[in-house]
Amino acid sequence: MGILWTILIGLLVGVVAKFIHPGKENLGLVMTALLGIAGSMVASFGGQVLGIYRAGQGAGFLGALIGAVLILFIYTRIKR
């Protein structure tokens, strides 16, 4: 059940990140879910480096959203 929740929350985070970030990325449903999951991972690892999170502690919704928007920003810069 944990994997299913991860995918659903990742999809929600990815959709919100695509709504916040301007432009058209042409990402499908699966890539949007992966974007949200990757954003959560970036936020978790970045938060651990900065001392915000402890090892094994995941980022919250806001942290995952910030990570996903950061990934979208980098993706659009590389795509150009």
Image (cartoon, rainbow, N blue to C red):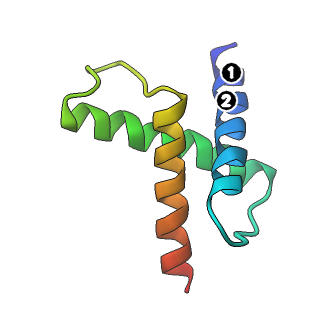
Disc 1 + disc 2, Cβ < 8 Å: yes
Q: Which of the two residues, 41 or 52, is positioned nearer the viewer here?
A: 52
- Whole-percent x and y of residue 29? 80, 50
Q: How many marks?
A: 2
Q: Please tell me which residue is depicted at 70% across the width and 51% down the height of the picture.
A: 32
Q: Please tell me which residue is depicted at 36% across the width and 19% down the height of the picture.
A: 57
**What's the residue type where badge 1 is placed?**
Trp
Q: SS at mark 2?
A: helix
Q: Please tell me which residue is depicted at 46% across the width and 57% down the height of the picture.
A: 70
- Within 10 Å of disc 2 (Cα), the crowding (few <14, some 14-19, many 20+) is some
Q: SS at mark 1?
A: helix
- Whole-percent x and y of residue 71? 49, 58
Circle 2 is placed at which residue position?
9
Give the spatial CA distance, label 1 vs label 2. Answer: 6 Å
- Whole-percent x and y of residue 11? 71, 39
Residue 74, relative to residue 79: is it above or below?
above
Give the residue furthest to the right.
29
Q: Nearer the viewer, mark 1 or mark 2?
A: 2
| Residue 5: assigned label | 1
Q: Please tell me which residue is depicted at 70% across the width and 69% down the height of the picture.
A: 25
**What's the residue type where badge 2 is placed?**
Ile
| Residue 50: assigned label | none
- Within 10 Å of disc 1 (Cα), the crowding (few <14, some 14-19, many 20+) is few
